[in-house]
């Protein structure tokens, strides 16, 4: 009888350990699958966010000599990128501030520093 009780207890313990081991394996597999799913979802959002990038433009400055017929308005039309300036007047105001001009009057032979944007990184 003692032997039977002992054997029965050992058998029941073995069955319980096997069930617990199966449960642990299933939990590990489910956890691993959840981590993989969340990783795929997370990285797919990140990739989409990077795919819609616009062209990067860099701001540069150059010195130009005013020629006959030139005006700040003409330079604003040539170099004033509407992506960075609300209007040509904003661009002209920046040029005037950079060159310490009190008004829009410029003279032939005068040098001006003007900003411009380019996609080339120098």
Image: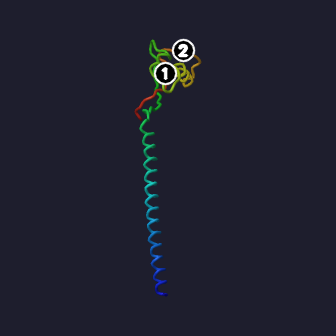
* Depth order, front residue of 14/32: 14
Percent of width and height locating residue 26: 44, 62
Establish if 19 lies above or below 92. Answer: below
Percent of width and height locating residue 90: 54, 22
Which residue position holds label 1?
111
Q: Residue furthest front?
A: 1
Percent of width and height locating residue 54: 43, 33
Q: Residues within 10 Å of mark 2 (few under 14, many from 20)?
A: few
- Location of residue 69 by image quarter: top left
Q: Residues within 10 Å of mark 1 (few under 14, many from 20)?
A: some
Residues under numbered marks 1 and 2 in contact, where contact means CB atoms less than 8 Å apart: no
Establish if 100 lies above or below 38. Answer: above
- Image quarter hosting the C terminus: top left
In terms of secondary structure, where does tag 1 sit?
Answer: strand
Coloring applied to the structure: rainbow
Query: Residue shown at 46%/14% (left/top)?
Result: 70
Number of callouts = 2
Q: Residue furthest right?
A: 102
Q: Is label 1 or label 2 in front?
A: 2
Establish if 19 lies above or below 106. Answer: below
Q: Residue furthest top?
A: 69
Query: Residue shown at 43%/44% (left/top)?
Result: 44
Numbered badge on residue 105: 2
* Depth order, front residue of 3/38: 3
Q: Residue furthest left?
A: 120
Residue 122 showing in the rendered view: no
Query: Residue shown at 45%/32% (left/top)?
Result: 58
In terms of secondary structure, where does tag 2 sit?
Answer: loop
Numbered badge on residue 34: none
Query: Residue shown at 52%/24% (left/top)?
Result: 85
* Depth order, front residue of 103/56: 56
* Depth order, front residue of 78/4: 4
């Amino acid at each position: 009888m003692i032997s039977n009780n002992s054997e029965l207890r050992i058998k029941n313990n073995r069955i319980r350990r096997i069930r617990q081991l199966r449960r642990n394996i299933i939990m590990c597999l489910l956890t691993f699958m959840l981590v993989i799913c969340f990783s795929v979802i997370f990285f797919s959002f990140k990739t989409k966010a990077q795919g819609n990038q616009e062209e990067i433009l860099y701001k540069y400055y150059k010195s130009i000599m005013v020629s006959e017929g030139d005006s700040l308005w003409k330079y604003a039309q040539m170099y004033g990128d509407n992506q960075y300036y609300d209007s040509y007047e904003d661009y002209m105001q920046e040029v005037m501030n950079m060159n310490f001009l009190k008004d829009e009057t410029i003279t032939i032979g005068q040098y001006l520093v003007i900003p411009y944007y380019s996609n080339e990184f120098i």
